[in-house]
Amino acid sequence: SQQGEEDPQALSIQEGENATMNCSYKTSINNLQWYRQNSGRGLVHLILIRSNEREKHSGRLRVTLDTSKKSSSLLITASRAADTASYFCATDPRTKGGSEKLVFGKGTKLTVNP
Amino acid sequence: DAGITQSPRYKITETGRQVTLMCHQTWSHSYMFWYRQDLGHGLRLIYYSAAADITDKGEVPDGYVVSRSKTENFPLTLESATRSQTSVYFCASSEALGTTSYEQYFGPGTRLTVT
């Protein structure tokens, strides 16, 4: 079963605009991660935010985490055509005995039009 | 080359045949993972390994076998391929300290078609 669910499923914007993707999850987590996948390629790690963090930045990326609402958002500012990709959130569920496994959502397909 | 590689990149096989997908990483990461990616299902974990000779089932292990005799290699075998196993398969590796997951590094994927 999927732990994280991204919203929207697809997003189309113009170059220079900001893109916001959301992720909701169901159980307590140790951390939440965002990955990018370009067409036909493997996933690439973007950012990791721990359960005790509320916001994290990396370049044009800004991630927020609200553990009370069990949700996270990924904001890409000043988008470029090269940002066109699918974006996945992955949660590290907090379980008894620990967990080394991530649970991935189904992804948001972002298209940035030049 | 440094990193994580998968072979073959593309494979067509017939129903009932045995197929092995290879995965090799050069970072000496403890953890390795196999996922399948299908439209509408996202990424699903098949098997994972915490170290050499330690493997465990993921969400969708039926029909698959794994082994890990060396830290750097984690082959995935489909013992008798079925059409439902047509998918894109990704291998990944990571370090994990304690009970928390860390970032995973993914290979380029193997596109498998079972006819």
Image (tube, coloured by chain):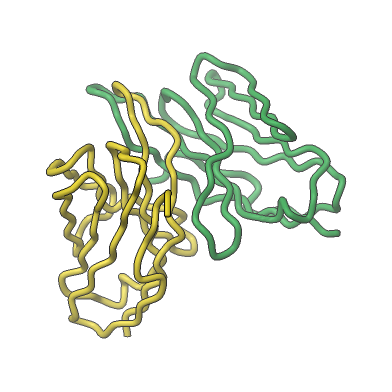
The residue sitting at 59% across, 63% down in the picture is: A39
Residue A36 position within the rendered picture, expressed as x and y whole percent measured from the top left: 58, 48
Q: In the rendered image of this protein, does residue B87 appear above or below residue B48?
A: below
Q: Which chain is green?
A: A
The residue sitting at 69% across, 30% down in the picture is: A62
Left/right of residue A101 with respect to residue A68 in the rendered view? left
The residue sitting at 18% across, 44% down in the picture is: B56
Residue A22 position within the rendered picture, expressed as x and y whole percent measured from the top left: 63, 38
* Of residues A67 and B67, the one drawn nearer to the viewer in this rendering: B67
Residue A82 position within the rendered picture, expressed as x and y whole percent measured from the top left: 73, 54
> Hey, which residue is sitting farthest front in the picture?
B1
The residue sitting at 57% across, 33% down in the picture is: A47
Quadrant, the C terminus of chain A: bottom right
Q: Which chain is yellow?
A: B
* Of residues B111 and B22, the one drawn nearer to the viewer in this rendering: B22
Left/right of residue A88 with respect to residue A15 in the rendered view? left
Residue A34 position within the rendered picture, expressed as x and y whole percent measured from the top left: 55, 38
Task: Write down the quadrant of residue B80 in the picture.
Answer: bottom left
Q: In the rendered image of this protein, does residue A45 appear above or below residue B1?
A: above
* Of residues A53 and A106, the one drawn nearer to the viewer in this rendering: A53
Left/right of residue B65 with respect to residue A35 in the rendered view? left
